[in-house]
Amino acid sequence: MQDVSSLVAQAREGRPRAVARLISLVEGASPQLREVMATLAPLTGGAYVVGLTGSPGVGKSTSTSALVTAYRKQGKRVGVLAVDPSSPFSGGALLGDRVRMSEHASDPGVYIRSMATRGHLGGLAWAAPQAIRVLDAAGCDVILVETVGVGQSEVEIASQADTSVVLLAPGMGDGIQAAKAGILEIGDVYVVNKADRDGADATARELNHMLGLGESRGPGDWRPPIVKTVAARGEGIEEVVEALEKHRAWMEERGVLAERRGARAAREVETIAVTALRERIADLHGDRRLSALAERIVAGELDPYGAADELVAGLTEGSAQM
């Protein structure tokens, strides 16, 4: 068993091995997980969490690396959480895209971690919220969360980040297809990367048109900007950072940032509670309570809602007797 307090203290000092061990405890659902989260709780809340999402091939990893460079020039500590598809063989993260961030590997002010989704829908690993908390407590000023580029399922990033950046690129599919994927509904800042390619201006115009459809924003509401970049050359990245800072300032002024973080915490609590409930239900297989309810449903003696009520009542009674 590792000394959690010591690990947290080392992580606060910027020691990458300590940060790595804490995130590993989170990913592995260690018995020390509760102690880790309790120790980190008073140390969090200072990091600005930026989510980057978009279809495969738009340059998320290159853009993330360019943003890291821009924030490091400002003297900020940066954490990168890159959520990858799980390997069907090892269950680990496929790290091909991470080589694009190798230039930051030796920078003590940057911490990069790949996490596997392990089949979790929504583009984010189930442990991502806790991993974000680890990086926050470790002193990162900015945390960049790069999600799996899988279209519709990656909209979950909007519930995990303070600001969501949606990346598109010319030739990667028209705006209508992007709208169908759902990612146009969650962006706070839109980036048309690879803007040196033919069709970049047309993509930006179409995106602007799509964002304007059905728009019902009032005075003072946030209107997502569209920024054109060539991330591979660092062009337009300063404009992206400026847009991010403007959105952060707008959220703080309107109280939106606190609302988003509160909603995020509520969802996290709900997820933990539902997971615990499922584990308890799974334990019921041993005394056949769940199986007996299922048999009564099949026999037409009970409907699923009534069975669920009995199951929940049984769990409640069990808790009261403990």
Image: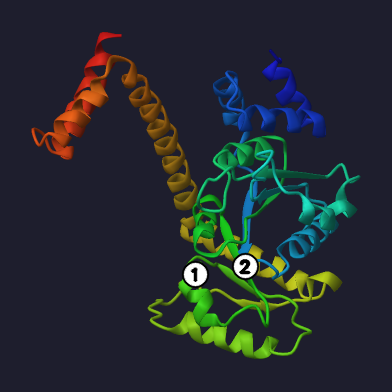
The picture places residue 314, in percent across and down from the top left corner, at 21, 20
Q: Horizontally, is 71 left or right of 281 in the view?
A: right
Amino acid type of the residue tagged 1 in the rendering: Ala
Q: Position of residue 102 (x, y in %)?
A: 87, 52
Three-letter amino acid code of the residue under disc 2: Ser
Front-most of residues 191 and 197: 197
The quarter of the rendered structure image containing the C terminus is top left
Tags 1 and 2 in contact by the CB under 8 Å rule? Answer: yes
Q: Residue at x 83, y 70 (%)?
A: 232
Q: Of callouts 1 and 2, which one flags the residue occurring earlier in the amino acid sequence?
A: 2
Q: Nearer the viewer, residue 133 or 94?
A: 94
Q: Residue at x 50, y 50 (%)?
A: 121
Residue at numbered disc 1: 181
Nearer the observer, 284 or 194: 284
- SS for tag 2? loop
Check the image and report above or below for 292 versus 303: above
Residue 7: percent from left, percent from top: 73, 22
Whether residue 3 sits left or right of residue 259 in the image: it is right
Q: Which residue is mark 2?
A: 55
**Gap between marks 1 and 2, in whole Å?**
9 Å
Question: Where on the picture, by quarter, is residue 3?
Answer: top right
The answer to whether residue 223 is seen in the rendering is no
Res 73 seen here:
yes
- The x, y position of residue 2, in whole percent, is 71, 15
Q: Disc number at residue 80?
A: none
Q: What crowding class fits label 2: few (fewer than 14 Cα within 10 Å), some (14-19), or many (20 or more)?
A: many
